[in-house]
Image (spheres, rainbow, N blue to C red):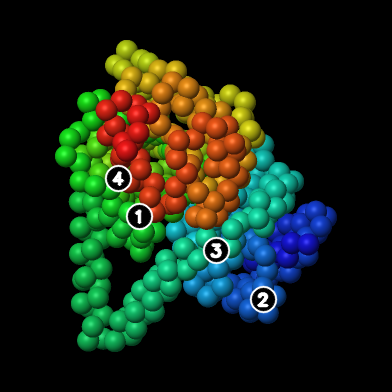
Amino acid sequence: MTDVLVVDDSQFIRTVVGDALEGAGCSVTTAASGERALELVDSNDPDVITMDVEMPGMSGIETVERIMSRTPTPILMLSAYTDEGAKATLDALERGALDVLQKPDGSGERNIGHLTDEVVEKVEQLSEATVSTLALARATAAVHATDRQRAASSASTPSTSAGAVTAGADTRAAGSTSRNRGSRSPPLEMDQPASIERAPTDHPLVIIGASTGGPRIIERIVATLPSALEARVLIVQHMPGDFTGRLATRLDTVSDYAITEATDGAPLEPGNVIVAKGGYHMRVVDGERGLEVRLDDGPRVHGVRPAIDVTMQTAAEVADGPLCGLVLTGMGRDGARGIDAIKTVGGHTIAQDEATSPVFGIPQQAIATGSVDEVVPASALVERLVAACLSERTGESDE
């Protein structure tokens, strides 16, 4: 039986989510505040936690930070339809939460029944998360906690508070005018690829697909991907529509690549990264100006939209140079057909290994096709990607 802690300041949400989880066979405990959640984590050691983002007192972000720095546990964020909620949720994912669902706001087709169904499904997935990989989040959460404590201490010391504020302002100003890799969070360590002595003959096209646990790994990939590679990169991260624009903006602050959310007709240009827009499939087509993306709100594939398969398969049909596909952590089989399509046209394919994948479903299903060239840990993804892109021809081993 899966033990779930439901944390939300809304009695209604605690009741309906808790009832749905109990109906699915889970053992449920609830907490109305972050402070109470910390107590229950210590005493109950839950298997999975659902966490409200915005709560009075200790926020969901701080609660996640404290849990992940002390007792790493799979956490599912439940976010309201607000800009602030989206920003806070991404902060929580950065601190180690693994996935996010949006609460319905009554303006669309989704209702509370859809939310509870999704929560049950996600909790089932997260209960199978590889616990050892959650330790990767411990350092991030611990550093954020230390920074917060130092900031509080500086604010309470008049002689240093002005300097601290000035330094913080300088850092933010610098971040707004130049790129500063890894400036917000301690790195999920990536092996540094060998220096690029020669650029690829053609600009490589790289498709990255991820789901549960993906944002932190994607962040480290774009932060360490050499600008000299001049790759054209497409990212498909399973995420609600209100979050993908924020994700693209956040990734842009840590990368030498220009990173934007997908728009219909956007060209695939060297040195640019395009993040699939939530709620739309991202197709690759050969347009009048070369390769570009098309947004498609057609039927879901594998129950998701955007789907990794759609982007990879359409890219394989029109790729005009070196092509590489990466599948990262996540549940389900989305990406398996896409990886197979990329391999079929001579592209190079890479899957994240089980030891570093919080949820191994997506990489595992791709590997099962027999079309994955390399299975590597998160730390080696960029190194192997660069090596593949620098091969004399797509799919040729560099060894």
Badge 1 element: loop
Q: Amino acid at mark 3?
A: Ser
Please, which residue is most extreme toward the top here? 288
Badge 3 element: helix
Query: Relative to 185, does residue 387 appear above or below in the rendering?
Result: above
Badge 4 element: loop
Q: Residues within 10 Å of mark 1 (few under 14, many from 20)?
A: some
Badge 2 element: helix
Quarter of the rendering occupied by the N terminus:
bottom right
Query: Which residue is found at the position 25% from the left and 44% from the top?
Result: 226
Residue under pointer 2 = 40
Q: Amino acid at mark 4?
A: Leu
Spatial distance from mark 2 to mark 3, Cα to Cα? 21 Å
Query: Marks 1 and 2: which is nearer the front?
Result: 1
387 lies left or right of 262: left
Residue 175 position, x and y percent, is: 24, 56
Query: Which residue is found at the position 70% from the left and 59% from the top?
Result: 13
Residue 335 position, x and y percent, is: 54, 34
Q: Does label 1 or label 4 sit earlier along the sequence?
A: 1
Please, which residue is most extreme toward the left here? 197
Query: Which residue is found at the position 50% from the left and 24% from the top?
Result: 341
Residue 64 position, x and y percent, is: 53, 67
Closer to the camera in the image, 10 or 180: 180
Q: Are marks 2 and 4 in contact (CB under 8 Å)?
A: no
Spatial distance from mark 3 to mark 1, Cα to Cα? 18 Å
Q: Does label 4 or label 3 sit earlier along the sequence?
A: 3
Q: Are marks 3 and 1 in contact (CB under 8 Å)?
A: no
